[in-house]
Image (cartoon, rainbow, N blue to C red):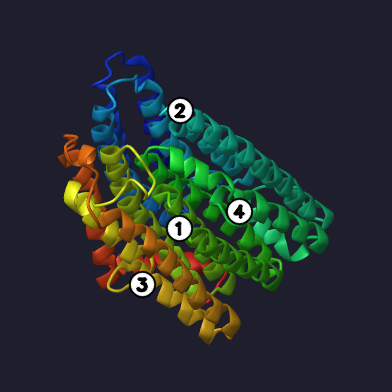
Amino acid sequence: MILSLILFPVAAAAAALAIPNNKIRPLLLPLSGTVHSAVTALLVMKPEYRVLNEWITLDPAGLLILLSVSLLYLPSSFYASGYLRYRGDRSNRVFVASFSSFLGLISLAVCSHHLGLMWVAIEGTTLVTAPLIYFNRSPRSIEATWKYLLVGSVGIALALLGTFFLAYSSLSGGSEATLDLALLVENAPGMSVPWLRSAFILLLVGYGTKMGLAPMHTWKPDAYGEAPGVVGALLAGGVTSGAFLALMRVYQIAGAAGQGAFASRLLVFMGLFSMATAGIFMINQRDFKRMLAYSSVEHMGILSLGAGIGGIALWGALLHVIMNAVTKGVLFLSAGNIHRAYRDKSTDSVQGAFRSIPLSASLFLAGFIAITGSPPFGPFVTEFTILNGAFTGGHFAAGVLFLLFLLVVFIGMGITVLKVVQGVPPRDVAEGGYRESLLTTAPVLFFMLLVIILGLYIPPFLRDMLDQAVLFLGNRL
């Protein structure tokens, strides 16, 4: 059952490379997304199907991230089909193959209980998403792609070195050298502390680069700014979620080894630093797609902060993975529609979106209100939970800074969003003939509906999944 999560999207990617018809190929994306979502739902309901072997196992934390990825991918796959209809000017063979391959590789990363296999899968997501960033084939997109590959490769190389350090810390402590997660957690109390701490720092930098934590975030503004909107959604809600899970695996080992306080301090610092960096670069940001990149940096900081505080804040951070994915779906897909209508990303030219494409503009504004933690939307619940965890856990300075940075982000992001949606659109846009289609608006509406529902009601099964994930990671509620 678990293998179908990995093999079916890869098979769909192979089929995309073989099918010669440019119009038929995109249909493979909703097909792979639907199958993946159906299998994910079955795994949520049937725990007995979650174990294949000691290397491929879906634990509570992995199941939660898998659900998040599946919720993001399915609507995005329908949107991608609609988007590719507008881009009939070029072949979509590589785009469809890469888009589908990503789903298989991120599923492998989520299900991996062997840290070496997990590393390979996450590196694979880097390789298959690079062609998606280059899809527009402009000088700036090729520059963004190379930056993404170079910075990401340095990060993932440091993660590999940290993985070796982790295995050696087990060997140095008198146990066998292994990368099996269960054995590492079991052997953690006897690990060499200096080697374990060095491993955690390297893995924090390595997987933090994939997440986009500051100051390792430098690839994000260019990649998100030049990639199609649907690719930005996949990067912001999919790649980053897989990297966050990888970091949580190491955090779990550090906690089992009695180094939880050391790991927590680093995570809290990186989280607050990322939020501060994002807030600074959002002020007077004219490129609305780059603004979304800095929003992603901010929310990776929120995840790191919640994980570092632990307890109920970790519960909020894990729920925030889902909230961030679906809300970023609203923002990136609606931003893609606006970019397509205006053929520009600067607020100097992009104005009056309410008049030119009212539905996408309204959803873009609603997405901004949601992602900045306003009620009654889902991110409000998660950010309030993290804030509650900070104050009840005695992290008063972190809680105050968290509120301050949220305010800065709200102001900076709000100025850019209001410039986009308000005003009078240029005449060439108003008369340009671009029309929103069902496939490029229905997925955005679906994401927005999820953001509202999860802000008002968290289903009991999801609460149980969150409780189990927090306990699995070695924290108490």
Q: Which callout, 2 or 4, points to the residue nearer the camera?
A: 2
Which of the 4 image quarters holds residue 263? Answer: bottom right
Distance CA(mark 1)–CA(mark 2): 24 Å
User: Secondary structure under badge 2?
Assistant: loop
Distance CA(mark 4)–CA(mark 1): 16 Å
Question: Residue under circle 4?
Answer: 208
Q: Which callout, 1 or 2, points to the residue nearer the camera?
A: 2
Distance CA(mark 2)–CA(mark 4): 28 Å
Q: In the rendered structure, which amino acid carries the disc numbered 1?
A: Ser
The first of marks 4 and 3 along the sequence is: 4
The first of marks 2 and 4 along the sequence is: 2
Say if residue 315 shows up in the picture: no
Residue furthest to the front: 427
Residue 299 at x, y percent in the picture: 47, 61
Q: In the rendered structure, which amino acid carries the disc numbered 4?
A: Gly
Choose between 9 and 213: the one closer to the eye: 213
In the image, is residue 444 above or below residue 431?
Answer: below
Please give the label number shown on residue 295: 1
Residue 423 at x, y percent in the picture: 24, 56
Question: Residue under circle 2?
Answer: 138
Quadrant (top left, top right, bottom left, bottom right) of the N terminus: top left
Q: In the rendered structure, which amino acid carries the disc numbered 2?
A: Ser
